[in-house]
Amino acid sequence: MTSRLNPVSGHPAETPEYPMTRAAGCPFDPPPALRAKQEEGPLTKVRLWDGSTPWLVTRYAEQRALLADPRVSADISRPGYPSSAPIGGSSTISFILMDDPEHARLRRMVTAPFTIKRVEALRPAVQKIVDDLIDDMLAGPKPVDLVEAFALPVPSLVICELLGVPYTDHDFFQDNSKTIIKRDAAPEQRSAALGNLAGYLDNLLGEKLTDPGDDMLSRLAERIKAGELSRQEAAQMGVLLLIAGHETTANMIALGTLALLEHPEQLALLRDTDDGKVVVSAVEELLRYLHITHNGRRRVALEDIEIAGQLIRAGDGLIMANDIGNRDPAAFPDPDRLDIRRDARHHVAFGFGVHQCLGQPLARLELQIVYSTLYRRLPTLRLATDLEQIPFKHDGSVYGVYELPVTW
Ligand code: HEM
């Protein structure tokens, strides 16, 4: 019997589609079809929206090996790159989609504010942001949408402060960020949103060039003056930091809270502990368990690579599905259980290799402060609706909830 062929790729039409859909059931678990693929083996072919058939890497060990392999490129403009959507005119979001040495040159210019020591110095300021927002919630009407009132403002206020972006513009940059990370946004919509944000940051850089402050954009403006960086490169870096700095953390706050409300014994452990180490490990475990960047780390092979008995050819697309990697039983025993006391530090929620998340110390700080404050100050926090009514972000490159109505 001959199998039906896909007209575009020439691969069997039964090659599964990626991304796979989450079935009804546990909203925190990766799609069951992804689990089935992981059980079958570490690598498999999948079919994307454009008919292309990159490799899907499902196991933790192979994902880390490939993400650390210099023969693998993150450059979206290379043929074979498994793009999650049609690429618009100006889709490049700075160094996250570049290879070394360009990637390293640009990344180095913004590493200083994200070192653990510098981030730790922000603890009192972040604690104040969190406390003030909770004060506002307590003083206002109930129920409240936790996303709008708390989960989005915390990281937005922090990244605005760090970059030197006026928080009063948050509606503008949040609307544009949402379009950029929406899976099914039309290429021209995404391109327009990127253009809007780049234009906005270019304007701000212009102001910082003449009237610098004590913030990251002003440091970038200095580099423009010194001829180390073009204004366009600086604006694109600003876009990357602005988007990465608030969308991801906001989703971890809201989805993390929902996961804890659905696991009351874990919530009680976290709320009632005086041990800072439990808070630290809860953050790592929630990062692992929820894995919000559920669209896979996308790469393309520069050379032939042999891994797990399989030959990946130069030019083949690769998708490291880190969400299922974080549920690999070989790396995390009983992986589908949320257990805030387990050691989950080796998770891949921040990626791995040279592109590993630059903002992870900041994300960790924000989540540690949020998780150790919110449930203590609102000990009777609960959902103000049924779980079935919560709108999940199935259509975004970052998983989470659009709204989380809560009361206390
Ligand atoms: C819980 C929150 C966060 C999660 C889950 C997260 C996740 C990730 C992941 C998975 C990557 C790797 C992308 C890849 O390999 O293709 C990444 C890269 C990056 N993240 Fe985050 N991130 C978070 C928060 C932040 C924050 C607060 C910032 C700060 C502005 C930030 C800035 C970046 C940057 C600049 C990169 C690109 C690094 C590079 O290409 O060298 N992230 N992040």
Image (cartoon, rainbow, N blue to C red):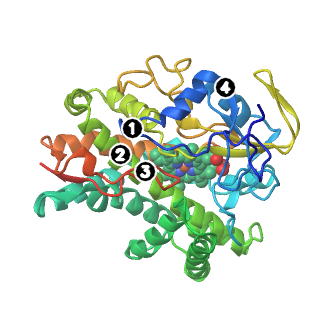
- Disc 3 C-beta below 8 A from ligand 1: yes
Name the amino acid, label 2: Leu
Disc 3 marks a residue whose amino acid type is Thr
The residue under label 4 is which amino acid type? Answer: Pro
Residue 390: image location, x then y, percent: 29, 51
Q: Residue at x 42, y 53 (%)?
A: 393
| First-in-chain label (3 vs 4) | 4
Assign a secondary structure to mark 2.
helix
- The quadrant of the rendering that contains the N terminus is top right
Q: CA distance from mark 3 to mark 4?
A: 29 Å
Marks 2 and 1: in contact by CB < 8 Å?
A: yes
Q: List the residue tagged with mark 4.
A: 42
For label 2, count other residues whose C-alpha is less than 10 Å away and answer few (under 14), some (14-19) or many (20+). Answer: many
CA gap, disc 2 to disc 4?
28 Å
Separation (CA) of disc 4 from disc 1: 22 Å
Q: Looking at the image, is mark 1 or mark 2 nearer the viewer?
A: 1
Q: Which residue is mark 2?
A: 255
Q: Please report whichever mark, 3 or 2, sits nearer to the chain's N-terminal start.
A: 3
Which disc, if any, is residue 304? none
The answer to whether marks 4 and 1 mark residues whose Cβ atoms lie closer than 8 Å is no
Which badge, 4 or 1, is on the more N-terminal residue?
1
Instruction: Report the mark closest to the observer, 3 or 1.
Output: 1
Comparing labels 2 and 4, the label whose residue is closer to the camera: 4
What SS does tag 3 mark?
helix
Query: Closest to the observer: 120 or 275?
Result: 275
Q: Nearer the viewer, residue 60 or 129?
A: 60
- Mark 1 residue element: loop
| Image coordinates for residue 374, horizontal then vertical, percent | 23, 45
- Look at mark 1 in the image and give the residue it sits on: 28
Specify which label sits upstream in the sequence, 3 or 1: 1
